[in-house]
Amino acid sequence: MAGVALKNLTKSFNKVTAVNSINLEIRDKEFMVLVGPSGCGKTTALRMIAGLEEATSGEIVIGDRVVNDVSPKDRDIAMVFQNYALYPHMSVYDNMSFGLRLKRTEGGGPWPFNSKRTFTEAEIDRRVQEAAEMLGLKPLLERKPKELSGGQRQRVALGRAIVREPKVFLMDEPLSNLDAKLRVQTRAELIKLHRRLGITTVYVTHDQVEAMTMGDRIAVMSNGIIQQCDKPLELYNHPANLFVAGFIGSPAMNFVPATVVETGGRLFIDCKSFKVVLPEALTAKAKPYVGKEVTFGIRPEDLYDSKVPTLVAATPDNTITVDVDVIEPLGNDVEMYLTIGGLQLIAMIDSGSSAKMGDKIDVLIDMTKSHLFDRETEQAIY
Ligand SMILES: Nc1ncnc2c1ncn2[C@@H]1O[C@H](COP(=O)(O)OP(=O)(O)OP(=O)(O)O)[C@@H](O)[C@H]1O
Ligand SMILES: [Mg+2]
C-alpha cells in the first residue's frame, strides 16, 4: 500500500502547459478523483504518475520513493484506460491472466508487465478467480469478449488491473463508454471494490456527479491548475472560487452581478432587479466589500416556492417575485426557469408547488446557503 504525492508537478508540450505546478497528496488507501473540463490536464497528470509521460519539472512520489526516473513497469501501479482493448481471440480468463503470465518470461513484454516477478499457475488462478468473484465474472470466464455486454467487458478490463494487485490504481474515465444505467451500477461496484481492496486510487473524470459520488476527496482542475481539493460536501458547501462553485452541482449555481450595500446597520446584496439581506452570521466577511462589485451565488436547490411549506422563514428581505418561464418536472423536484428584471434564475422546487408556466410567484432565497465572490479575483468571500 502506498500514498502518492505530486510536488510542483508541471508538464509542458511546446507552448501548452498541460499541468501547471500542481501539488497533491493522495493518502494511502484513498480514492482521489481528478475532475475538470476537457483539456484541463487530467489525463496528462495521470500519465505522469504512471510514467507514460515525463514530467517537465516537479516530483512524483509513490510510497516513500521518488519515481520520476523509475520506469512505468517498476512503479507498481495498474492503469485502466478509457479505451481499454481486450484481446478478442482470448477468453475472459486468459484476458485477465495474460499480464501475470507475461511477467513470468524474463525481459517481460511492454508496460505494464513487470518482468521481475514470476507467478505460479496456482497463484495466477487464485488471483483470477478472486477478481472474477468480486466482479461477478465467474460464469463468464470461458467467453470471448464479443460474447459479452459492454459493462461485462468493462469489468474484464478492471479485472485485468485488479489481478496485478498493484499499490496504486490509476483510472482514466473508465466508465465513459457505458450507457447511463450501467455507469451508475459500475460506479457502485467500483466503490465497493475499493472498500474491499483498499488500494490507493486516482480516478479521472469530467463528470462532477461521478466525482461527488465516488471520491473520498476531489481535486477540481482547470487550465492545468488544481483549483480546490477537498471532500465532496466541502466543495459543494464551501467552493473556494467561482470556477469550483459553477462546476460542482447540477443544475449549476446561479450567479448574479451584485453590489454589497449597507442600510440601517444591515448589509444587503443589491442585484439591481432585487435586493436581499445578509444573515447576521455572514456580515463580518462581507463588510469589507461594502460599495464594491461582487458576484452573488445561489444554488437552484436553495430557492423555494413561498407557497410550499419549508423551514426557511419568509421575510420581505429574502423574498423575490419572479416570472415562471419554463417548468420541467423531474419527479421529486421541478426544475423552474425563472426571470426577474431581465435576469434568469434556475430553481429546483419541491414538486408540491402548484406554479404553472406564465405565473408570477414569490420565491424565498435561503440566504444562509448563499455565496459571494470577489468580482476581480473570483475568490469566495464567504
Ligand atoms: N502529446 C501532446 N502534445 C501536445 N499537447 C498535448 C498533448 N497531450 C495533451 N496535450 C494538451 O494538454 C492539455 C491537457 O490535455 P489532457 O489530455 O491532459 O486533458 P484532459 O483533462 O484529460 O481532457 P479530456 O477530459 O478531454 O480527456 C490539452 O490542451 C491538450 O491539448
Ligand atoms: Mg483525458
Image: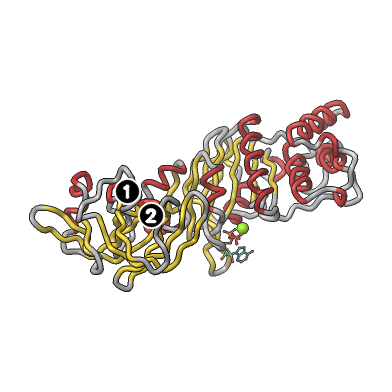
Q: CA distance from mark 1 to mark 2?
A: 8 Å
Res 31 quadrant in image: top right
Q: Position of residue 243 (x, y in %)?
A: 41, 59
Quadrant location, the N terminus: top right
Count residues near mark 1 (Cα–Cα under 10 Å), then give few for <14, some for 14-19, many for 20+: some
Residue at image location 64% in from the left, 47% down from the top: 171
On the image, numbered disc 2 is attached to which residue? 299
* Kind of element beneath mark 1: helix
* Kind of element beneath mark 2: loop
Residue at image location 46% in from the left, 58% down from the top: 335
Horizontally, residue 8 falls left or right of residue 144, namely left
Residue 332 in sight from this viewpoint: yes
Horizontally, residue 111 falls left or right of residue 356, namely right
Q: Position of residue 342 (x, y in %)?
A: 32, 73
On the image, numbered disc 1 is attached to which residue? 369
Which of 177/103 is in front?
177
Horizontally, residue 267 falls left or right of residue 73, namely left
